[in-house]
Image: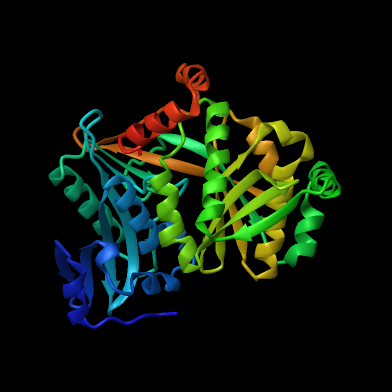
Amino acid sequence: MNVSLKPAQFAGAEAKRAQAFGGRHLLLQVNPVQYPGWDSLLHAHPDRCVFHTAAWARVLTETYGHEPAYFTHFYGGELAGLLPVMKVSSLFVGARAVSLPFTDYCPALFGPDCYQNELYKLALQWSRAAGCRFIEFRGNGNGMPGATPSLVFYGHIVDLNGGAGRAWERLDPAVRRGVRKAKEAGVDVKFSTEEEAVREFYRLHCKTRRRHGLPPQPYSFFRNIAAHILQHGLGVVATANWEGRAIAAAIFLWFGRRAVYKYGASDYAFQHLRPNNLVMWQAIEWLAERRYESLHLGRTSRGNEGLRRFKQGFGAVEETIAYYKFDVVQNCFVRDVDRALGWYNSVFRRLPVPVLRLVGTLLYKHIS
C-alpha cells in the first residue's frame, strides 16, 4: 500500500528541519504524535512493527516525557525511509538518543530509494545539537561507516503462516506436555483489551520483577499501553486463570500482520501448572487463526539460557539482535554492558513491592 501526500500536509507535521534533494526527495524531522495519518505511511515497508507507530510514540512521550525526532525520507510524496529516535533527558546520567526506548528491537525502515546515509547524518547532527552524549540504534545502525555492535542478544520468531496446526507440530514435546497439563488442571486463558486485564497483569508483573530482582515499570506505562494501543486494536492481554485467580498473563502487540510478545508475568506459586506454556501457546493459536504472519518473542540476553530454551520450545527461529551505540562526542562506536544481571538484583529481591514500584517510577525515566 503506497500513500501519497500533498506538500501542504507537511506543514502540520511540525518538521523542524527539511532538505530537498533532486526536487522529488525530501528529508524531514517529524513528530509522529502530531502527524495525521502517520501509521498509514508505514504499510509500504515490510519490516514495519508496532514500535514504529504513533501509538507507541504516545506511550513513551506521555509516560516518560521523551522527545520524538523521527528522521524521514520522502520520495515523490511517499515514505522511502525512516530512522526513529527519541531524546531521553536525565539530570543523573545526561541526555542521550535512543532508537527507540523500551523496545527490544526497532529497525530503521530503508526502502530501495532511501538516502540511508543522509538520515544517519541528520540523526547525528540533531543529537549533537540536542546535547546528547550517545545515540543508540536497536536492531540496526550497521549502515554507518565503522559500525560495531555494542551489545548482541538472541531474538526468536515464531512463523504463523502455516496455521495453528503447523505451529503445534513445531512445539517441543516438553512444551506440548506442559500445555496439556495446564488444560487438564483446569487452567483457562482469556483474551481482553480492558484495563481490568491490564491491572491483573500488573499485579503479576510486580511479583515477577521482584522475583527477578528488578523494579517494575510504573503502572502509568501500562495504562498508556491500554489507552493508546490495546483500545485501538493493536494488542491484547492474555490471562491464565485457575479457580477464579489470575496466575499468569502476557501482553501481545501487533501492527500489520506481525505480532510481538512484549511482556510476560506469572505467580511462581502456580508454576507447576505450567500456565506460561498455555498462555504462549493459546496466543500463538489465537494469532494464527487471525492470519498473522509471525510472532516475535523479543530479545533474550546471551547469558539467559533458561529463557532462551523456553522460547526455542515454541518452534521459534533464532536470530541475532545487535545494538549499536555511538559516542557523539568522541565520534566513534563504543561497547556497552548488558545490565540485566548485577549486584542490585539481590537488593531488589529483598524490597517490598510498594517500594519497588516507587523505585521503578523514579528510575525508568532515566534508564530508558
Q: Residue 243 at what x, y percent from top left?
A: 75, 46
Number of dots carrying numbers: 0
Q: Nearer the viewer, residue 119 or 71?
A: 71
Q: Is residue 161 above or below residue 343?
A: below
> In the displayed structure, does residue 276 sit left or right of residue 116?
right
Q: Residue at the location (17% across, 66% down)?
A: 14
| Quadrant of the drawing holding the N terminus | bottom left
The quarter of the picture where residue 360 lies is: top left
Q: Residue 118 at what x, y percent from top left?
A: 24, 58
Considering every residue shown, the one lying at the far front of the view is 244
Q: Is residue 338 visible?
A: no
Q: Residue at the location (62% across, 67% down)?
A: 292
Q: Is residue 62 above or below residue 208?
A: below
Q: Residue 353 at what x, y percent from top left?
A: 49, 29
> In the displayed structure, does residue 257 sit left or right of residue 190?
left
Q: Nearer the viewer, residue 266 or 92?
A: 266
Q: Residue at the location (77% across, 48% down)?
A: 187
How is the structure coloured here? Answer: rainbow
The quarter of the picture where residue 356 lies is: top left
Q: Residue at the location (46% across, 67% down)?
A: 232
| Quadrant of the drawing holding the C terminus | top left
Q: Residue 12 at what x, y percent from top left?
A: 19, 73
Q: Is residue 317 visible?
A: yes
